[in-house]
Amino acid sequence: MNQFSKQLDQAKKRQKRFYLLSGLAILGIIFLVSGLFVVSRGTRVEITPPDAEAHAVIHVIDGPGFSIGDSVYSFSGNPVIRAAAPGFRTATKTIDSKYLGKVFPLELSELPGRLIIELSGRSAYFPETTWQVNEHTADPTDTLDLELEAGVYTVTILNPFFQSEQLNVEIKRRKKTALTVNLRPIEGVLSIASKPSGATVLIDDKAVGQTPVQLNKPGGRYTLRVSADGYADTVEQLAVTRDKPQVDRNYQLGFKTEKITLDLEPKGGTLLVNGVQMNPPLSLNTVTTHHLTYMKAGYYPETITIRPTADQENKVTFQLKAEIGQVDIASSPAATVWIDDKNYGVTPIKASLPAVPHQVTFKKTGYRTVTQRIHPKGEFTQEISITLITEQQARLQEAPHEYTNSAGIKLKLFLVKDQLNMGAPSSEKGQRANEFQRTVRLTKPFYASIFEITNQQFAQFDSQKSAAPPNHPVTQVSWQKAAAYCNWLSQQENRRPFYVITNNTVTGFNSSADGYRLLTEAEWEWLARKSGKLAQTIFSWGDDTTIPANTANIADENAQGTVRFYVPYYRDGYTSVAPVGRFNQELSGLYDLAGNVSEWVHDVYSIIPPSANSPVLNNPLGTQQGQTHVIKGANFRSGTMTTLRPAYREGLTEGRDDVGFRIGRYLLEDVLNE
């Protein structure tokens, strides 16, 4: 075999091997694809709408798998596919495992169309156009430019100055629909009138007639000016709209004004223009004459007449003249006069004062200060004459006849100027040796409590009495404790304490203080025997030894067996202490002086008789100190002629279950001069 034949034989062998290998490869691919079809699960993708399905292209973009036509083959779950069709939006979806090997629905949405509507006409108002597409409203704009899904739409065009327009528009996908709409202006009417009439009417600075005038105007905004000689221009922005095509105006024109320059002396006065108060800066009309009045207290007013003009300076100057009044001031007695906090001397005085209100004060030691307001006038002399009263007289006039104090105690005022024969003569039945006869004179006004002090009132000072019957008179109280209670009451009302107390013991008293105290023996006996009566009596009820019914709580027939002596044929309804105020009010206006409990009084007890020629004692208070003090008045154990008389007196150092007290105080801190 030649060399060429050998080469040809080798070439044939290589060709056989190639075909053999190619066939084996193709056979392997066929077996592999067949295997894949057998192993994988084919899922058909159902594309809607139908016109999208015909041209749809499907690709597997995530996960092992592939697509053939409208089917997707995957070797694992949840492949991600992308579907595209002309005229539709590309969709990317994940095929859930429940759809593998089944039908997977996929809807493609159409690409939108575009609608453009432009307007023609009076373009100045186009930006205020409102667009409604079906039931949706777009923001105001002069051109509508929207992407819309394919379909038929109703477009409504609204503008306040034009007639409304409505269009039906069909939108196709991926298509632009362009329209131009000519807006038709509405027809409106301007009706303009004025007072006065005949004024020039200008629309957008162009004269269109005189009032009254009626103008046809298309929808829009207009600057209206109404002008007349001597009057200020009236300017207004008007709008003729679809909702209000008729605009009516009737103007009351105001006068044209000019600024008035004012020079006012003195400053701070009141300016009247034609009788009406006004404040600078001032502008007045040029049509009428004006009356300007300037006034200030203490000056004569001035009036100037002016008619402003536009071609000269309008200046008004006021220079007021001071008004001085004469005042003659007198008082009785003579007193120092202060006018507006300045000392003018002692009355009588004559003063020249500006004609403005002044405060005149009269001062004199011991007398109530008096203040008056005066207003001098320049045309006559004003006279003032005052009668001063003492401070004590003033306080007497101001004092209440009765009042209730801070502890709930009712007190009555006694304006007394009277004499009393204290004690009893030896010839008086029941008289005791310690009932010394003395003549006393009472001149100081004083208050006395209408009722005896109760447990409730005393418990505010000493809580130990809070458990006792609240409306019973407080008992078992020492004189020292009663005096301390009086000082406590004074402190509650910021009054000057009457008693001087050192280390819980009374060491003296202040006779000029108006603080609370116990009644003096003289005051107590005067209240019981003479207050409210024509003459001094033996008993609180009079001179008759027969006790009237319901007079007092004393030892009556019910007390038999509990006391040594009792009053026969008298019954008061109580065997011991009674609530305060249960018996008839006495002529003094007080209660229970004749009985219930005896009462501490202020005075130190003494058994030293006065001298035979003792002078009349004025408002006696007794000595400053002492261990034993006087008690006065009968109590529920009293049943004899001796103890029932107000002249009866005892001396005690400690409290007792049948002894209480009532309080008093001087009205004034200083003694009244007679």
Image (cartoon, grey):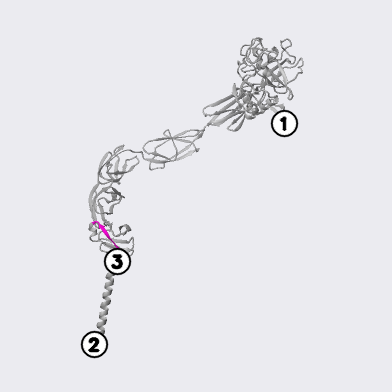
Q: For the residues carrying marks 2 and 1, which lies nearer the camera in this image?
A: 2
Seen at 70% across and 28% down, the residue is 500
Which quadrant of the structure image shows residue 426? Answer: top right
Task: Quarter of the image for the N terminus: give it.
Answer: bottom left
> Is residue 333 visible to the viewer in this orientation of the structure?
no
Q: Establish if 129 lies above or below 425.
A: below
Of 397 and 110, which appears nearest the observer?
110
Left or right, residue 479 beside residue 35: right
Q: Quote the CA–CA distance across marks 2 and 1.
A: 162 Å
In which quadrant will I find the C terminus? top right
**Distance (Cα) linking label 3 and label 2:** 46 Å
- Above/below status of 409 relative to 8: above
Answer with the quarter of the image where residue 495 lies: top right
Q: Which mark is residue 503?
A: 1
Along the polypeptide, which appears first: circle 1 or circle 3? 3
Q: Which mark is residue 36?
A: 3
The amino acid on which the numbered mark 3 sits, given as a three-letter code, is Leu
Q: Residues within 10 Å of mark 3 (few under 14, many from 20)?
A: some
- Look at the image and tell me whether residue 291 can be seen: yes
- The residue where tag 2 is placed is 5
Please state the extent of the stretch shown in magenta in the rendering: 38-49
Dominant SS of magenta comes to strand
Residue type, numbered disc 1: Asn
Amino acid at circle 2: Ser
Helix, strand or loop under label 2 = helix
The CA distance from mark 1 to mark 3 is: 123 Å
